[in-house]
């Protein structure tokens, strides 16, 4: 989901150049200038990877800022306000559609309509984070229209909100009403900063120490091996995507706290869910909430009868899938969940409730893991080949067997980290010096190992050695 | 209050470490070359609109910073040791033996490379219209498998060599080292921290080759042995396990007088050994000055006779020193750098013997055989 050249949090440049510079400037800066500073450094952050799309970002900000102002101004004339809202939303979606889906739509048309096969598909590089910041901006104008949030008259404050670097690239999708107040008056504090440091380091560890390792294993096992390695590989990818994504959210939340912001939780141990419905209450919470508030409920939600509700579910999930990427397999992945959720609503949940919790967890995990395969393979041929490996009995060659064995300890650690067991053990410790020392040592060790991982990233195993 | 103290310490430590790293990164002088990793480090990226807008600048800046991170050696070593602790050896390209020796991970079958390289060598022998000798050297890990106790992929050098030899044409005579090496003092055949064979290993191969030609070879006792301490080789650099102790490099000197000249270096030299090279990170270049496109060694011993051409990789830096004692003239050609037609050279010089000597690893990964003509 992330491009190659973004300034990611888990990089040397971010950690040891950008972050110290930003923190220094931020805390030296008088409070009333902090939003401006945040806006400027966020643009630097965004422009680091793609300066060409800075214009797009600024345009999005201007569009929604003006949209909000006008909607507020014509509030008394309901029709005009509604038209203004519609216009802003359509323009937002047009931007997203053009930059993200042009190629996809044209390719799909080409394969559907024989006469169009000669059509040239333009190559449009996907602007980083566009799906996130367009959604954030839209939440603002809609909230203003619904009177859920006050209009923002300060363009700097609004710019800081849309471009805010902690959540710019990979979320969480912060709804405007959740931070409206914090934008104008927020209190930085030692306690907040410390908790931010903790969450940030945990996120960094999830990404660099667990997700990356699981990614390496999946890379090895996804294309060759037997049945066992297909299952282990699927688990590895399931873990990778969780630690990658939730690690990034943790880092965003942590950075936000360091700057005095409080963002809502985005992941809540999704892999211990006992139903698919529960899974989606724990996975990428900010996205599901966004779709619920701005699509599902406006469509009528569950208030217009069962048939309409099921239709709404399918619409929302097709869109959720498509939001993840411009390819049919993401739509398929979304519809896969629509099926599960509908089934649970109609009958499956009742059946599930009769089963023991552990078994329910396993079944849900299986459904989710299979779902990730739909998510991962953009090529149907590869997907079917992999499914063939999963559901047939094929022996292992020595190389994949060795990969499985080698990664077993890391994987066990990752499985443990995906459950709340570690956290509840920590919380059970008696408050006091020992607990404090443990937490500092633990975080210190993770940070040290993360730095080690970052330093060796540039270590090219195929070094040119004069043999 | 206690909670406060914890927060205070945590913030302080975190800020201290990121600010200290940032400051040291800015202030510390930058090296061009890493002695430990034996590679050139990333240069500072140049700032321009093009590099910035293409994302090139960001990418290079990240590499540059990683390469010049303060305490880089420590961090890289920490990562390598952690991976080892987590049992990830089999996923790395260097394995650690029980004795602390470092080995290249096994080479896997590469049927396409084997076929095309063998085709090139066969065609070369045919073009010369003469017998060509062919020697593949097994890897250190293969000979020392019993030393590697941890999880490892299988070393199949015997199969790899057999597969190559099976494709040898009628002009090719294959020289088998596996029996000789298997019967030898295995622990002495290769360096502990480098993938090359030692003087002992090279001498065994030399003797095997001379025997197969029916030529006389020198006995071990004809050489005076000396030791150069503090050698860290390639597997050390690649492993990042800096705690591995250095080793002695054993030098075999037959006491003869030679004239050595290089195609890409001015002057004539009167020794097979190049002591000034010991000052450099890669001390292995002590043998015959390291890699050159073409090396010519003239034996000044009036009784020496015959001439030999060796198509080779770096294993022959050492092997060449032994062969030099048994011929009047030895020419070493490295296909990675020598791009002239070798058949032309053969016609001009009329070599008595032609040897193709490669390590299994280089044979499977080198794609320069196509230049052979």
Image (cartoon, rainbow, N blue to C red):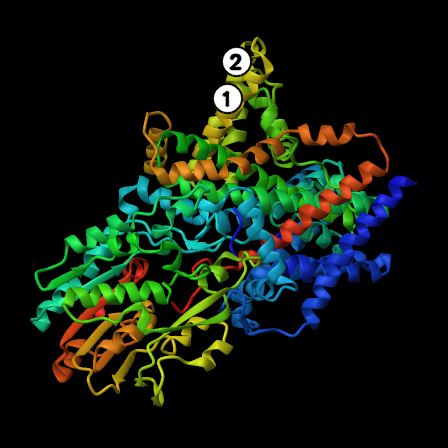
Residue B242 vertical position relative to residue A296 in the rendered view, above or below: below
Mark 1 near mark 2, Cβ–Cβ under 8 Å? yes
Counting every numbered tag in the picture gives 2
Residue at x 67%, y 29% (from the top left corner): A420
Q: Which subunit holds the residue at mark 2? A: A
First in sequence: mark 1 or mark 2? 1
Left or right side of B211 for A31: right
Q: Quadrant of residue A248?
A: top right
Q: Which subunit holds the residue at mark 1? A: A
Mark number displayed over residue A173: none
Which residue is under mark 2? A348
Are labels 1 and 2 on one chain? yes
Residue A108 vertical position relative to residue B125 in the rendered view, above or below: above
Left or right side of A410 for A398: left
Q: Position of residue B79 (x, y in %)?
A: 58, 52
Q: Badge 1, how many Cα within 10 Å: few under 14, some, many 20+? A: some
Between marks 1 and 2, how big is the CA–CA gap?
Answer: 8 Å
Q: Position of residue B308 (x, y in %)?
A: 19, 76
* Quadrant holding the C terminus of chain A: bottom left
Q: Secondary structure at mark 2?
A: helix
Q: Is residue A188 visible?
A: no
Mark number displayed over residue A340: 1
């Amino acid at each position: 989901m992330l491009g190659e050249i973004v300034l990611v949090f888990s990089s040397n440049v971010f950690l040891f150049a950008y972050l110290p510079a930003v923190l220094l400037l931020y805390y030296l800066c008088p409070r009333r200038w902090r939003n401006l500073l945040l806006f400027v450094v966020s643009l630097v952050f965004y422009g680091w990877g793609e300066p060409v799309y800075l214009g797009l970002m600024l345009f999005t900000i201007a569009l929604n800022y003006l949209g909000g102002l006008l909607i507020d101004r014509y509030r008394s004339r309901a029709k005009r306000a509604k038209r203004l809202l519609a216009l802003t939303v359509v323009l937002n979606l047009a931007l997203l559609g053009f930059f993200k889906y042009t190629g996809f739509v044209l390719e799909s048309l080409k394969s559907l309509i024989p006469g169009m096969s000669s059509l040239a598909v333009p190559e449009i590089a996907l602007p980083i984070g566009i799906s996130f910041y367009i959604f954030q901006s839209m939440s603002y104008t809609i909230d203003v229209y619904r009177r859920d949030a006050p209009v923002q008259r300060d363009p700097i404050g609004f710019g800081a909100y849309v471009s805010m670097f902690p959540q710019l690239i990979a979320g969480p999708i912060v709804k405007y009403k959740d931070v409206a107040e914090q934008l104008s008056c927020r209190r930085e504090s030692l306690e907040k900063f410390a908790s931010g440091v903790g969450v940030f380091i945990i996120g960094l560890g999830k990404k660099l120490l667990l997700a990356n390792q699981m990614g390496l294993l999946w890379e090895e096992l996804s294309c060759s091996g037997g049945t066992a390695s297909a299952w282990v590989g699927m688990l590895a990818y399931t873990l990778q995507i969780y630690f990658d994504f939730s690690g990034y959210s943790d880092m965003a939340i942590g950075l936000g706290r360091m700057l005095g912001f409080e963002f809502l939780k985005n992941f809540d141990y999704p892999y211990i869910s006992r139903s698919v419905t529960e899974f989606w209450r724990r996975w990428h919470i900010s996205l599901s909430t966004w779709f619920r508030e701005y699509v599902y409920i406006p469509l009528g939600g569950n208030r217009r009868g069962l048939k309409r509700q099921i239709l709404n579910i399918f619409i929302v999930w097709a869109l959720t899938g498509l939001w993840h990427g411009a390819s049919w397999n993401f739509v398929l992945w979304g519809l896969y969940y629509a099926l599960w959720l509908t089934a649970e609503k109609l009958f499956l949940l009742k059946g599930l409730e009769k089963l023991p919790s552990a078994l329910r967890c396993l079944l849900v995990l299986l459904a989710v893991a299979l779902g990730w395969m739909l998510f991962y393979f953009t090529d149907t041929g590869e997907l079917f080949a992999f499914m063939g490996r999963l559901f047939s009995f094929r022996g292992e060659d020595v190389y994949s067997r060795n990969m499985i064995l080698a990664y077993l300890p890391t994987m066990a650690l990752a499985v443990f980290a995906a459950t709340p067991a570690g956290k509840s053990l920590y919380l059970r410790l008696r408050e006091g010096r020992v607990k404090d020392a443990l937490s500092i040592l633990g975080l210190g060790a993770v940070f040290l190992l993360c730095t080690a991982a970052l330093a060796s990233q540039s270590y090219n195993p195929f070094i040119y050695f004069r043999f | 209050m206690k909670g406060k103290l914890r927060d205070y310490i945590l913030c302080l430590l975190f800020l201290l470490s990121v600010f200290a790293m940032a400051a040291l990164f800015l202030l510390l002088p930058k090296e061009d070359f890493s002695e430990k990793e034996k590679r050139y480090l990333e240069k500072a990226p140049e700032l321009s609109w093009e590099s910035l807008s293409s994302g090139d600048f960001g990418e290079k800046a990240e590499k540059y910073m990683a390469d010049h991170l303060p305490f880089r050696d420590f961090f890289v070593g920490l990562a390598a040791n952690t991976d080892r602790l987590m049992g990830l050896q089999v996923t790395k390209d260097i394995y650690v033996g029980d004795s602390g020796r470092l080995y290249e991970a096994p080479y896997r079958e590469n049927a396409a490379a084997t076929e095309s390289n063998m085709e090139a060598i066969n065609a070369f022998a045919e073009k010369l219209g003469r017998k060509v000798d062919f020697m593949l050297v097994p890897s250190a890990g293969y000979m020392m498998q019993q030393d590697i106790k941890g999880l490892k992929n299988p070393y199949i050098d015997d199969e790899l060599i057999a597969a190559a030899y099976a494709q040898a044409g009628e002009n090719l005579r294959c020289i088998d080292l596996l029996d000789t090496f298997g019967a030898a003092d295995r622990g002495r055949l290769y360096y502990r921290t480098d993938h090359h064979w030692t003087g002992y290993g090279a001498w065994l191969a030399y003797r095997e080759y001379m025997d197969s030609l029916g030529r006389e070879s020198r006995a071990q006792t004809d050489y005076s042995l000396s030791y150069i301490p503090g050698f860290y080789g390639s597997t050390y650099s690649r492993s990042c396990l800096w705690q591995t102790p250095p080793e002695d490099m054993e030098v075999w000197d037959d006491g003869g007088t030679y004239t050595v000249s290089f195609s890409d270096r001015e002057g004539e030299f009167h020794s097979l050994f190049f002591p000034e090279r010991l000052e450099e990170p890669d001390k292995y270049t002590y043998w015959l000055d390291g890699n050159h496109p073409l090396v010519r060694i003239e034996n000044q011993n009036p009784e020496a006779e015959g001439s030999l051409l060796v198509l080779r990789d770096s294993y022959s830096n050492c092997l060449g020193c032994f062969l030099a004692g048994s011929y009047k003239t030895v020419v070493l050609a490295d296909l990675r750098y020598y791009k002239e037609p070798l058949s032309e050279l053969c016609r001009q010089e009329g070599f008595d013997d032609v040897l193709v000597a490669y390590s299994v690893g280089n044979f499977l990964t080198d794609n320069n055989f196509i230049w052979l003509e």
